[in-house]
Image: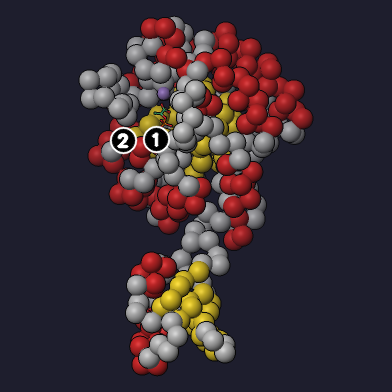
Amino acid sequence: MIIILKDHAPKDEVEKLIANIEEMGVSTHIIEGERQTIIGLVGDTSRINEHDVSAHEVVDAVKRVSEPYKMANRKFHPDNTVIPMGSTSIGGEALTMIAGPCSVESEEQIIAVAQAVKESGATMLRGGAFKPRTSPYSFQGLHDEGIQLLLKAKKATGLPIVTEIMSAAHLDLFADVDVIQVGARNMQNFELLKELGHCNKPILLKRGLSSTLEELLMSAEYIMAGGNQQVILCERGIRTFETATRNTLDLSAVPMLKKLTHLPVIIDPSHACGIAWMVEPMARGAVAVGADGLIIEVHNNPQKALCDGKQSITPAAFDQLVKELRPMASLMGRTL
Ligand code: PEP
Ligand code: MN
């Protein structure tokens, strides 16, 4: 971090600023130029908030030269994080294929979808039990019953399960869940992230609707700073001015995140596009840009789905999608 001082900054105030900064465990180097004085900070500046520093009366500007996230940063952890999962892993050579309905609706529905997607090559089952809906009058999910049904589907198929948490108060219900999802709307629910930092389960962290990649990584950092290093990042479309699709799939997030972090990165083409027929081409694009996996909404009767039917593909379409992805996956050195 570099602090540029105002012209004629009173010496005693500058000394106070330096003392404040050094109290936070970093050392300072003063560079006195002809026209400007600069303080260079050396050490771990992740605990220093540049906005707080810039509020100091002698400070003209503050510039960060290193990222504010340490644990998620590839610079300090060059090897990819690989998270063991069932008979496979996330972030390794195998392409992670998570499939299942937006929400768990009944035992018949979740077991039928789980069996079908497993047969086609899915490596994990998804299904929402707690649904973040825009309207309080929409179906909110089956809650604990939904989790029990997912566990039945896991027993029937052997597929590990991923489901969304909306409140830390529900954490006990997730004891047998394999991966806990934090949805886009909760990406910056910092108290929830802190709680998940103390839990010993992989967390699938979805990018917020209007969040930058740095904000996504800072949210991952919240979980990791609590001790839980098993974070999977998910790009699921962001809000733009475009209205033809539900969101805009930011495929550029994949190579950029892969550069910035060692964490696995997956793509959710279903919520990104919001349209079933677009899922397959965007999934292919995701694999082509280096995603570690996909999370795809599959429903046995999309027209009757209680949530997100428009973007849900049928088990037959999922089967076809996996077949069409295989050549692209092998081109990228991935197994599927
Ligand atoms: C979901 O996965 O069903 C979901 C609600 O996703 P998002 O948080 O990305 O909207
Ligand atoms: Mn959904």
Query: Is the CB–ligand 1 distance for label 2 below 8 Å?
Result: no
Q: Is residue 15 visible?
A: no
Type of amino acid at the residue the image marks with label 2 = Met
Q: Residue at x 52, y 36 (%)?
A: 235
- Figure quadrant of residue 122: top right
Mark 2: secondary structure: loop
Report whether 143 appears left or right of 228.
Answer: left
| Residue farthest bottom in this picture | 11
The residue beneath circle 1 is 183
Q: Position of residue 87 (x, y in %)?
A: 59, 30
Query: Is the CB–ligand 1 distance for label 1 below 8 Å?
Result: yes
184 above or below 262? above
Q: Residue at x 56, y 56 (%)?
A: 73
Q: Residue at x 36, y 37 (%)?
A: 185
The residue beneath circle 2 is 166
Q: Residues within 10 Å of mark 2 (few under 14, many from 20)?
A: some
Closest to the observer: 172 or 286? 286
Mark pair 1, 2: CA separation:
8 Å
Mark 1: secondary structure: loop
80 above or below 315? below
Type of amino acid at the residue the image marks with label 1 = Gly
Closest to the observer: 323 or 90? 323
Report whether 285 appears left or right of 29.
Answer: right
Q: Position of residue 136 (x, y in %)?
A: 23, 25
Q: Are marks 1 and 2 in contact (CB under 8 Å)?
A: yes
Q: Position of residue 166 (x, y in %)?
A: 31, 35
Closest to the observer: 306 or 119? 306
Q: Residue at x 65, y 25 (%)?
A: 284
- Ligand 1 lies in which image quarter? top left
